[in-house]
Amino acid sequence: MTAPLLVLVGPMGVGKSTVGALVAERLGCVFRDTDDDIVAEQGRTIADIFVDEGEPAFRAIEKRAVRKALAGHDGVLALGGGAILDEDTRALLAGHRVVYLSMDVEEAVKRTGLNVARPLLAVNPRRQWRDLMEARRHLYTEVAGAVVPTDGRNPEEVAQAVLDAV
Ligand code: S3P
């Protein structure tokens, strides 16, 4: 059984995929994203899964994808922003090196705007971001061994901060 060198968690739009790919490049390993695994396995977009089956069904699919990736990947792994909502997933992360990429609400609104491809932000992004961050911030902190703030930093700077933190 293999384990990721590093797992990135944090809200959608924080740059987990961009930063994760940069960190993997610098470490000379492979980057993997559980959202991509889900799309490949399901043959449809995440937005389509939400619309067709609803969030609970998506979370069940996501939980399986995270479990599989944690046991079968030895590079850098990024999790979808809501993966940490699941208690079993949080427990599984306890044995891994996890970095939380954080951003404040205004930065989140600026970066994602009204992005209909992200089903959780389809209406009133500012209020939804505030609620989302309030509900999840402590969960990201709970699973992470290090927090890297991304506000006002470009992906290269964030990638360097991640490497410095681990
Ligand atoms: C979600 C984040 C998304 C994706 C889905 C739900 C969330 O992943 O899994 O839209 O609940 O925050 P990214 O964080 O990779 O955008």
Image: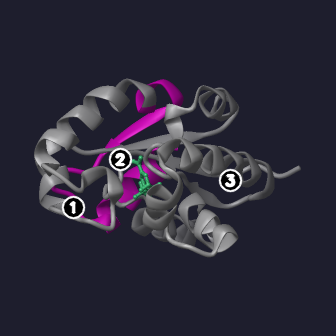
Can you give x and y, in whole percent of width and height, for residue 76 in the image?
A: 60, 59
The span picked out in magenta is 140-166
Question: Residue at label 1?
Answer: 112
Does any atom of ligand 1 lie closer than 8 Å to the CB of label 3?
no
Side of 36 relative to 17 (left or right): right
> Which of the two labelled residues, at mark 3 and mark 2, occupies the earlier sequence position?
2
The answer to whether residue 10 is left or right of residue 153 is: right
32 sits left or right of 135 in the view: right
Q: Is residue 104 visible?
A: no
**Which amino acid type is marked by label 3?**
Ala
Find out whether residue 99 is within the magenta segment: no
Which structural element holds mark 2? loop
Q: Secondary structure at mark 1?
A: helix
- Confirm or reject: label 2 Cβ below 8 Å from ligand 1: yes
Residue that appears at 66% across and 38% down: 96
Q: Residue furthest front?
A: 52
On whether residue 148 falls in the magenta region, the answer is yes
Label 2 crowding class (10 Å Cα cut-off): few <14, some 14-19, many 20+? many
On screen, residue 106 above or below 140: below
In space, the residues marked 3 and 2 are separated at their CA atoms by: 18 Å
The Cα–Cα distance between marks 1 and 3, rounded to whole angstroms, is 24 Å
Q: Which residue is mark 2?
A: 11
Residue 65's disc number: 3
Considering only order in the chain, which callout, 2 or 1, is on the residue closer to the N terminus? 2
